[in-house]
Image (spheres, rainbow, N blue to C red):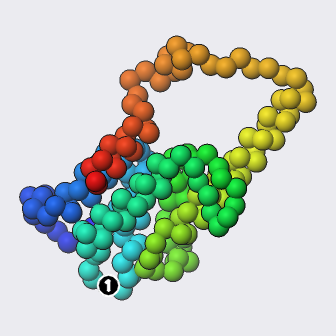
Amino acid sequence: PSCGAVASLEAYANDTNARTVLAAVMTAPEPLAQRLPGYLALFRRPDSPRGISWARARRVVKELLALIQDADIQWKGGRVLKNDQSYWTHALNVVAEKAEAGTLDRPLTGHNLLRKIAYEHADKQAEADLYQKEAQARSRAHVAPITSVERDALTPGQSDPAHQGAKAQEVLD
């Protein structure tokens, strides 16, 4: 992936790992699917004409999707927070910006930088949510919870992103 190789889709279809990676990327929820190929490219040396192997790409994608789908997120003994796909999207964007700016040490050898950025974003969001709840409690504001009927009316025809991520993980297994 991202190695500059040109081949027909049939050529990649002959490799089980390539098929699996392509299927996982295609079934990953947006906007994660857009960032995955660029993220995979960061696992190769910038001066190398070769891309990472499809077997390694499969392992990287499988590990990343598992992190994204975990119910909780934690980093270096910090508090355990509820995980959300938006934290990972943010982290992928930050890593891509670092790569474009030339401030990223390449090749990546694991997901620790991404995990750190995602956790820091989750921690900031948790603090903001707590502040908002405290402010509401102080002002005694009460907002009625949204009903399932109202929620369904807000997003007609959209599929559940968590379900899409699970589909992508199933492809890798």
Name of the residue lying farthest toward the top: 149
Q: What residue lies at 81% left-to-right and 41% top-to-bottom?
A: 131
Q: Residue at x 66, y 59 (%)?
A: 120
Out of 170 and 30, give the one closest to the viewer: 170
Q: Residues within 10 Å of mark 1 (few under 14, many from 20)?
A: few
The quadrant in which the N terminus is found is bottom left
Q: Position of residue 8 (x, y in %)?
A: 11, 61
Q: Is residue 96 above or below residue 147?
A: below
Q: Quadrant of residue 59?
A: bottom left
| Amino acid at circle 1 | Ser
Query: Relative to the observer, which residue lies in front, 158 or 16?
Result: 16
**Residue to which mark 1 is pinned:** 48
Identified at 58% across, 58% down, the residue is 118
Q: In the image, what residue occupies the spot 36% across and 60% down?
A: 61
Residue, far right: 138
Q: In the rendered image, is residue 3 in sight?
A: no
Residue 100 percent across, percent down from the top left: 49, 71
Q: Quadrant of residue 58?
A: bottom left
Residue 159 percent across, percent down from the top left: 39, 31
The reply to whether residue 80 is visible in this rendering is: yes
Q: Position of residue 49 (x, y in %)?
A: 27, 82
For the residue pair 163 and 95, the one nearer the viewer reads as 163
Q: Quadrant of residue 101?
A: bottom right
Question: Looking at the image, is 147 positioned above or below residue 123?
Answer: above
Horizontal relation, residue 80 to residue 39: left or right: right
Helix, strand or loop at label 1? It is loop
